[in-house]
Image (cartoon, rainbow, N blue to C red):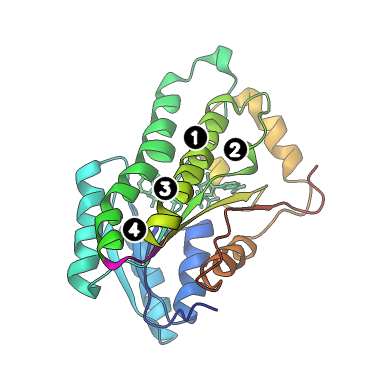
Amino acid sequence: MTDLKNKVAIITGASSGIGEATAHLLAEKGVKVVLAARRVEKLEALKNDIEKNGGTAEIVVTDVSHKVAVQHLADHTIDKFGKIDFLINNAGLMPLSFVKNLHIDEWEKMIDVNIKGVMYAVAAVLPNMRKNKYGHIINISSVAGKKVMPGSAVYSATKFAVRAFTEGLRMELSPQENIRATSIEPGAVATELTNTITDDEIQQFVDKLKEMEMLTSEDIARAILYAVEQPQHVNIGELLIMPKEQG
Ligand code: NDP
């Protein structure tokens, strides 16, 4: 298995949900975690919790849709810890809506954060990983990156893109550069993600999903841990994790 002690991980979207749970779990395993998101007070509370438990955490307030901010995140991580071993590319939003309702601003935001943000982060960490001939990029796609539903056209388009991008990374970087790439594809997870929905017509679908026993953020954190702690010759290309009740 890969020894996680003193590995360095950037986690985007660390201020809540899956990112927060992953930060806790990786820090417990001895990974130095760099927490990135926009809500500084949430990041500070998480850093305090991690440090209370004996872990190491650093905060870099980052809007991943800004290329310069994402580059600063990587540069600061290298200044502080000397390297980047893991990138957990998790920041995202899901303002589901029906296409006919033309929530164009939300479409643009999803493209900026869910696609461009993921790519900016890969671009920012790659030179260091290539120099070290070592790295693992974990991109959070979704079951919506494999299946489209009414209301998920644009969100699914972004998550299909993440999945395609990750597979391209794996094929280019894993054999040549010793940089692994994994796409994590959760079904419904109980987080703040649905808070960004403004299309009232979609609310019924969301309420229906909440009737079943959803996954927890910790369920997904364990899947991420599973991928990063595999022995060096193993690259988990993708993991689909579904609530038992979700078809
Ligand atoms: P949350 O809403 O709890 O987390 C989203 C995170 O993304 C927050 O930390 C938020 O931080 C961050 N974020 C949003 N916009 C930006 C931005 N512009 N710059 C930096 N950070 C940003 O939801 P989840 O934990 O559920 O979502 C995490 C990922 O998992 C997303 O990519 C989502 O698409 C994916 N996913 C979630 C599923 C679910 O059912 N919950 C299912 C499948 C995939 P802040 O607001 O502080 O910037």
**Does dot 3 land on a helix, a strand or a loop?**
helix
Mark sitting on residue 172? 3
Nearest the eye: 33 or 190: 33
Eyeballing the image, is 31 above or below 86? below
**Amino acid under label 3?**
Glu
Q: To which residue does mark 2 refer?
A: 145
Q: Which residues are magenta?
A: 132-136
Mark 1 Cα within 10 Å, few/some/many (few <14, many 20+)? some
Left or right of 223, for residue 84? left
Q: CA distance from mark 4 to mark 3?
A: 26 Å
Can you give x and y, in whole percent of width and height, for residue 215 in the image? 69, 56
State left or right for residue 131 relative to residue 146: left
Q: Nearer the viewer, mark 1 or mark 3?
A: 3
Residue depth check, mark 2 versus mark 4: number of the one nearer the observer: 2
Measure the C-alpha gap from mark 1 to mark 2: 8 Å
- In the rendering, at what x and y percent does residue 103 appear? 48, 20
State which tag comes first along the sequence, 1 or 2.
2
At x 60%, y 68%, the residue is 222
